[in-house]
Amino acid sequence: MPSKPRRVYDRAFAIARCRWECLRRTAGYRADVRAAIRKGAKSFNMKPGAFEEYCLKEGGVIEPPSGTDARKEYDEVRMRYGLRVIIHYDVALSLDEIADYPIFLDTPHRQPKIKNKAMLRRFAISGLTDLTGRTRRRIFSTRDVDRGPFQLNAKRIDLTCFDRDLAVFDLRADGAQFKTIAKRLGISVDQAKRAWRRTSTLVPNWLAVESHVRDCVTCQAYANGRRSRGCAKLELQLGRGATHSLGSINMPEGQLGLVNARTRGELPARRSARPTD
């Protein structure tokens, strides 16, 4: 028996699934989906919560609103991410579902193209259901499509560990510590840290900072100057570590300036200093 399972699906479908799992976690796409839900609910004379529940029951596809202007905005959002339709960010698509209906416009890379519309019209009018290979080649051809706008920022992705890495990302983005994540997923702390580094590169912006600060009490105190740091979620999005801020450490006069200079790289680190003759 081979050590790895046989590759059944095309690479493009596997990459499309990875792209969707990263896209639905970004703050920008989540905000656009919520805006599309509000506009769609207004178009269908429904409450946003009821309209959202209806879309989730129907597979997660956000129904486009009626009206020329509203439909144009819907298509602009859809094309911004290279999607065929706008899908709710809570929907997790499997590889089988992506292969049955590729949600990205550039998947697969080679797509069928109608070569003879008149012949296709005659075939549809005839009512025949058996399309021979010769007739199919006379009606359709294939073409290469351009790459879509939302691409993964990685040269190689390990599909065997991708779902585990996403689980680490979700827990870490919620503010969980690496020890807690490792214990919950049954992995080591180093594996959790490496998974976080990989996925945080694939999903660089996962938190809407402005809306989060409005709703978070800790971040409101940080914005008003009553705290030196925000909550764990905000600090992760801003890219800061878990160490204390320099303003909360008691230092002698002039020491704070030296620490800031070392942080900016203007002075060598303390451990690198060596006595000279």
Image (cartoon, grey):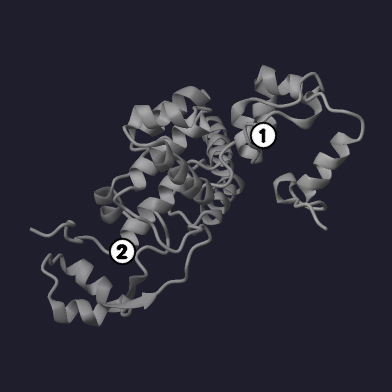
Position of residue 110 relative to residue 246, above or below, is below
Query: In the rendered view, does 91 fall on the left or right side of 5?
Result: right
Q: Amino acid at mark 2?
A: Arg
* Residue 39 quadrant: top right
Q: Residue furthest left?
A: 1
Image spot of residue 246 (x, y percent): 78, 31
Asked if residue 27 shows in the view, the reply is yes
Q: Earlier in the sequence, mark 1 or mark 2?
A: 2
Q: Residue furthest front?
A: 277
Near mark 2 (Cα within 10 A), the count class, few <14, some 14-19 or many ≥20, is few
Q: Residue at x 74, y 48 (%)?
A: 269
Query: In the rendered view, does 96 fall on the left or right side of 264?
Result: left
Asked if residue 86 shows in the view, the reply is no
Residue nearest the observer in this picture, 71 or 50: 50
Residue nearest the observer in this picture, 41 or 3: 3
Q: Which mark is residue 84?
A: none
Quadrant placement of the N terminus: bottom left
- In contact (CB < 8 Å): disc 1 and disc 2: no
CA separation, marks 1 and 2?
Answer: 35 Å
Q: Residue at x 88, y 39 (%)?
A: 257
Image spot of residue 244 (x, y percent): 70, 28
Does dot 2 land on a helix, a strand or a loop? helix
Q: Residue at x 66, y 34 (%)?
A: 209
Q: Amino acid at mark 1?
A: Val
> Where is mark 2, residue-wise?
11
Quadrant placement of the C terminus: bottom right
> Where is mark 1, residue-wise?
209
Image spot of residue 83 (x, y percent): 46, 54
Query: In the rendered view, does 185 fall on the left or right side of 155?
Result: left
